[in-house]
Image (cartoon, coloured by chain):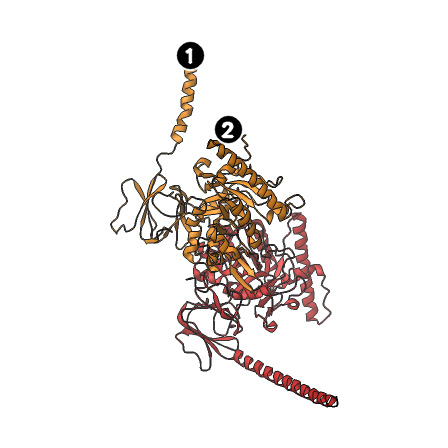
Amino acid sequence: MSMKPRAFRVMNFLAAFSLAMFFSSAVGSQEKKDKEEEKKKSSVHAVVGATVLPVSGPMVRRGTVTWKDGKILEVGAELDPPEGAEVHKGKGLYVCPGFVSVVSMGVGIATSSGNIRNGLDPWDRELAIALASGITTVQALPAPFFGGFGQDGPLSGGANSAIIKLTRGDLGGMLVREPAMNYFSLPTRQLELNYFLMRERFNQAKKYLAGRAEARAKKAKEPKLSSSLKLYVAVLENTRPTVFSPANNHEVKIVLSLSKEYGFDVVLNEPKDAWMMAAELAAGNVPVLVKSRGRDFDFNTTGPVFEKGQMAPVRRPAAFARAGCLVSILPYRRGISLSGLAGRVVATVDVDAAFAVRGGMSNEDALEAITLNPARILRVDDRLGSIEKGKDADLLILSGHPLDYRSFVLKAFINGKLYYERDKSRIFREVPLTRDK
Amino acid sequence: MIRSRNTVILLLALSVCALPLCRGEEPTAPKWAIRGGKVVTVTKGTLEGAVVLVSGGRIEKLVAAPGPGWKPPAGYKLIDAGERWIVPGFVELHSHIAGGDLNDMVYPVNPGFRTLDNIMPRNALLKRAQAGGVTTALFIPGSGTNMGGFGTLIKTAGKDLSEMLVRFPGALKIAQGGNPERRGGDIGYSRLGMNWLIRNALKEGKLYTEAWDAWEADKTKKKPLRNPRLEMFRGLFHKEYPVVVHTQGYHLILSTLRILHDEMGLWVVIDHGTFDGFELASEVAKRGIQVMNGPREFRWDNRRGGFRGLAYEWYRGGIKTIGVNTDSPVVPAEELIHQASMAVRFGLKEDVALAGITIHAARALGMEKRLGSLEAGKDADIVIWTGDPLDPRQSVVLTMVNGKIAYDTSKEPQRF
């Protein structure tokens, strides 16, 4: 009995000591590990011997791409990797820029309202799936409340949007810009009255901007901005393009005239029959976001066959591109659904690009329409969308051509860091890389 | 006198009326010699630079090595497909697009219903299906009730129903769970009720069939009463046509195997087989049941945190003849080949995926002697592709159904 308190004290001391040792060593090793990791991440990388599709230029066989501190250093054939670079095997593989999804809903964000920067979710499952499928940047919009298969809500006026990178598990790397674009809904009923009111608001917004400029010049108090004018002012400020979803060519004409009259840039989202006026859109530098596949769940046996005088969806991206429009191919659905319908979500935008090739686009144009063109439309092409010296090192190493439906992303880099590796991820672990079994 | 003159006039008038009818009849179907870069026979390998000879709406023969100086025999029109691929027309086992109106949800079991009367030949959705290389489709009732009725096997092209019809009944449609629960509240709200309803209806059909079999074999002196509602069960129990089952997931497929195959002895085709249904692959394979997987082509496995390719998992589990479907318009009919491509994306071998929507789909309906491959004697359902049909970048150039050109992009815009 007498030994017990003493033994207890000794044990107490030993336990406290070992605990302290454990913590200090754990903290120390963690710090060291972090530093090593950081060093590794910021070091020079190179992928060697790959077929490189830089998008901004011609294909490079046996190509090398090197990058440092998140920016691309060099692209060329048979270059030797710089000393000390972490070399990634490229032989027999393809390298291309990460795909840019021009519109997505609910990917990488855990919010349905408010600012997107407050709802970024680097651990979002849909983000992980999109990244594993080769998408490195998205324009994220909140997921609609009732999404159905693939969360395909309408692009409603005044929607929040942000350009985010899919840096899995890394909140700091995500936000590129918020807001990304303006979303504007045209009136659908009582057209005479509502078009009149819409123009009135544009006029008021113009007046407000003039007043504000005057006040700023005089360093006086700026006029108050009413909430109903906010969107109109944002459109006229034109710091980012405005997206319209015209239902018919009449509405396309209205959008074009508004854009000319008030001097702002527009982007047309799924303009239904606007392929008929593609030359006019090209002349006005109006980019289009188009799908390469038609509506699903159509029971209408008297619907379009896409015979003479009509144009099948699969041919539309090529038709716009031929006319000289800046085309970005939309995914079949704007969200990611795990319902099981394959090849029809934001993650499989490469399949939609492949369908555009079916309709007459070249492989090069179709790849550009899911990389550099969306970057141009989102006005981030100074940083994203192609493999060029000085641009962000957002690139993919793939098992085959990016538009081959059988290709897998083997590694995905964003800001020069490795965020996805097929061999270490569970997402495609059950799917064989080669199909010879 | 007057009367006889009238008769002569009437006869003359009738003969004039009859003339266009005679003229309207088709002359003998054209004869074709189709030469391509690759001829994918499906059953007998892929032949480089071969020629397919077509006459009378059927494949007459394949000329494997025609040689550079080869000319088509007299009377045959040459279609030179250059480097393009020649592929058999696809067979879709789950289609709802031939005429709409598929779910008459008053009674939970409807063995008297049939889709034959609803078919709208040459409708827009069928024409789009042609542009995806689909030449045969099983047009079945929806899954709103436990027994939707009898489906019809049709070609996707033809001037009228008689030309399109391949077989009626094509198959019986049974939906074992899922969608029939939509009605809720009556019997059939839960699977207890549904299984009873299905078993009860089939038992009735089986007894009816047995009674007529006994009468026809002279084993009884009591002639059974005709019952039009049960009449089509006789062919079903004689295995002249299968039952295609809306069944998916482990739980439901278990009841499919027990009730429809083991108890009732029916010829069963699993026509969804999605979710975790593939876990039963060995049991399904043991019974020789064909699976047409779709329209869902993958499962997100929460436990493993990754994708599972459904067709691939069925194949790996023992269903070597796995095929896919679209459940069109859930997935548009023209995207049947896209479903196969996605099966490949998620792990299935290319040749297995192609066989699954051609020869294996035909065999699932007992039509392997007429459909599903490029072989002498089979229907001339032939599709020319710009290249490998599984690659979404390739498209259909020409679709021939029963030896007649249904879709030709040299004469009309590309539909898909």
Q: Quadrant of residue B353?
A: bottom left
Label 2 is found on which chain of the structure? B
Q: Which label lies toward us, 1 or 2? A: 2
Task: Check disc 1 and give the amino acid type.
Answer: Ser
Q: Colour of chain B?
A: orange
Residue A9 visible in this rendered orientation of the protein: yes
Q: Is residue A389 above or below residue B401?
A: below
- Judged from this view, the residue extending furthest toward the top is B1
- Where does label 2 land, which residue? B221
Amino acid type assigned to the residue bearing label 2 in the image: Lys
Question: In terms of depth relative to the viewer, which is nearer, B12 or B410?
Answer: B12
Indicate the quadrant where residue A1 lies: bottom right
Marked residue nearer the N-terminal end (1 or 2)? 1
The one nearer the camera, A11 or B13, is A11
- To which chain does the residue with label 1 belong? B
The residues tagged by marks 1 and 2 sit, at their Cα atoms, a distance apart of 55 Å
Answer yes or no: is residue B335 visible: no
> Which label sits on residue A276?
none
- What percent of the width, then of the height, locates residue A50? 42, 71
Give the colour in which the image draws chain A: red
Q: Where does residue A317 sit, x and y in percent of width and height?
A: 49, 56
* Percent of width and height locating residue A159: 64, 60
Quarter holding residue A224: bottom right
Above or below, B8 against B190 in this view is above
Mark 1 Cα within 10 Å, few/some/many (few <14, many 20+)?
A: few
Residue identified by numbered label 1: B4
